[in-house]
Image: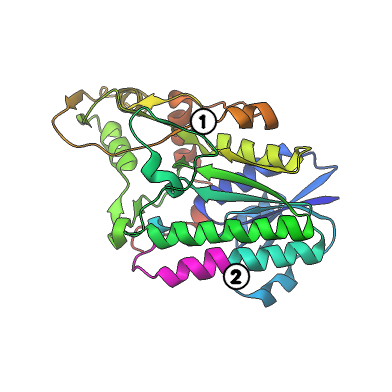
Amino acid sequence: MKKIVIFGATGNVGSYLTKYASEFFNKDEYEVVAVGRRPKADVFPDMGVPYFSVDVTKPEDFDKLPSEDVYAVMLLAAQIPSYMKDYDGGLYLSSITMGAFNVLEWCRKVGADRVIYTQTVFDISLAAGPGKLLAPDTPPAFSYTGDHAMYVIAKNAALEIMEHYKQEYGIKKFVFRLPTIYSYSPYHFYFPNGKKTKRPVYTMIERAMRGETLEVWGDPNYSKDMVYVDDFSQELCLAALADRNGGFYNIGTGNPISLREQVETIADVFAPASGRSEVVYRPELPSGGGFLMDVQNAKDELGYEPKFGCRELFEAYKAEMAVDRFASIRMKAED
């Protein structure tokens, strides 16, 4: 039976990918295997997915993993800026660049057919702009300053290592460039520039659940891709089955969502019985940015069909809030 091995399975996106993959692949032909740094993650065996605790920075840890019938490897494991409390550029190099090297060495040894890798959209952040559609083959354009610089450099170096393993050993390389992937987590914080901050989407949802006024800052027509984790997962799983030698794709939906639609939908979906939040527009105030991703080649070459619009995304959020299925492997609010 062919194995689909997911590194980074205990991360927020990785855990939902693992769940999706366990339901996507034919169980008579494929076995999904979850890999993460946590010593235990019982949530995966409970869904019929074996779990292995592996630190990708330690080559000796890979001896714990299966060595036969490894077909596709999905590599998400990485230190990311969102969860780095105190800046340490070396952690990017060890977890991302050397981590990728160690994963690829293991792939070579066990004869894996392909690697499916998640690249950051920040490698082309300077090419973005309001209304600009970013193509998969957009050349790198990023800032060499700030808390994302070493992260992008480490990611780009990992891509070069993958190209070497593709040309030298024939390991197929599928790369997916990610904007923000939306998936519910009971941990509502992140660390921009090392400062613990509540994610704006959770602040907005909490206010909507209390029926409090919601504000739309900046241009309400400013639009960006909002990708639910199941659409992201669909693209990666399709790549595992694709009869191709590899490819470079964007993660996206092809359906831009405006600030207006986002906030009005949150007000609708999370409205309490006491009444829906009023939405107030504040065009004089600054707003955050976002990205528009061209996903046409993923549709043409992989058969990708995004399923989640804005309403479906937030309805899924609401459903996951009620279930809280991955609470046991999430950070706590006091962390």
Instruction: Please state if 17 lies on the left or on the right of 227 as rendered.
Output: right
Categorize mark 1 by other alpha carbons within 10 Å: few (<14), some (14-19), many (20+): many
Pinpoint residue 17: horizontal percent, then vertical percent: 60, 45
Gap between marks 1 and 2, in whole Å?
34 Å
Q: Residue at x 39, y 70 (%)?
A: 88
State which region is magenta.
84-98
In the rendered view, tell whether residue 59 sits above or below residue 273: below
Question: Dot 2 corresponds to which residue?
Answer: 55
Under circle 1, the secondary element is: loop
Amino acid on which the number 2 mark rests in the picture: Asp
Q: Quadrant of the C terminus?
A: bottom left
Question: Dot 1 corresponds to which residue?
Answer: 294
Pinpoint residue 239: horizontal percent, then vertical percent: 69, 40
Work out whether residue 269 or residue 313 is closer to the camera in this orientation and state it.
313
Q: Residue at x 83, y 50 (%)?
A: 2
Categorize mark 2 by other alpha carbons within 10 Å: few (<14), some (14-19), many (20+): many
In the rendered view, tell whether residue 41 sits above or below residue 25: below
Under circle 2, the secondary element is: loop
